[in-house]
Image (spheres, helix red, strand yellow):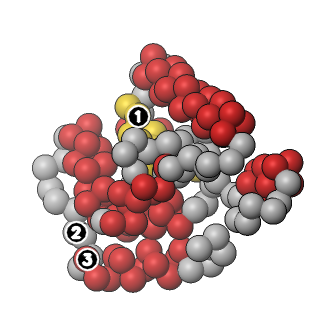
Amino acid sequence: MTDNLSSQRRSWNMSRIRSTDTKPEIVLRSVLHRMGFRFRLHCRGLSGRPDIVLPKYNTVIFVHGCFWHQHPGCIEAVRPKSNKKYWTAKLEGNVKRDMKNRRALRREGWRVFRFWECQIEKDPIRIAMRVAKHLRGIAQESTEYALPPRAELLKAAESRAGCNKRR
Ligand SMILES: [Zn+2]
């Protein structure tokens, strides 16, 4: 992003960046799927359109971009220096809206997970395992899932995410 773009043009560019089906989201989905969980995506009927919805478990998952959703303390969440007023309003608005959405979902009885893209990029399997532990608790399943080897899981997730052009 260069600074000689007019601010209007820039915000137009930014608005076109896809916020669903990002690579971390696809990777997490792929790992959960391999673990045997089935889910729906971007449910329109739910507050904030959670990225992953597991109706059977009353569980929803948001995969949040660190910049747009302002991951606290994350280097990716640094705000642009120019056009400060615009960005502050926009990003703080996003954070408030996220909080409202999470609250509404909890009131409706959903368990809400929120993960940051940088967390998933670092270790998607660890994140998926956290979700799996919760889901298994609900299902009261005592048996461990036959989980393919870690390397295999990651390779499958990567190849699935490869069709995404964002990164
Ligand atoms: Zn982050």
Left/right placement of residue 161 relative to residue 106 reads right
Residue in view at x 70 percent, y 65 percent: 1
> Disc number at residue 146?
2
Quarter location, residue 92: top right
Q: Nearer the viewer, mark 2 or mark 1?
A: 1
Mark 2 or mark 1: name the one nearer the start of the chain. Answer: 1
Left/right placement of residue 55 relative to residue 154 reads right
Q: Secondary structure at mark 2?
A: loop
Quadrant where the C terminus sits is: bottom right
Disc 3, disc 1: CB below 8 Å? no
Kind of residue at disc 2: Ala
Q: Nearer the viewer, mark 3 or mark 2?
A: 3
Residue at the outermost top position: 107
- CA gap, disc 3 and disc 2: 12 Å
Taking the image as drawn, is residue 32 in sight? no
Q: Secondary structure at mark 1?
A: strand
Disc 2, disc 1: CB below 8 Å? no
**Is 134 placed above or below 144 here?**
above
**Is 105 placed above or below 119 here?**
above
Q: Position of residue 83 (x, y in %)?
A: 71, 43
Q: Dot 2: within a 10 Å radius of its alpha carbon, few (fewer than 14), some, or many (20 or more) residues?
A: few
Residue in view at x 50 percent, y 82 percent: 159
Mark 3 or mark 1: name the one nearer the start of the chain. Answer: 1
**Which residue is identified by label 3?**
150
- CA gap, disc 2 and disc 1: 25 Å
Kind of residue at disc 3: Arg
Q: Secondary structure at mark 3?
A: helix
> Disc number at residue 112?
1
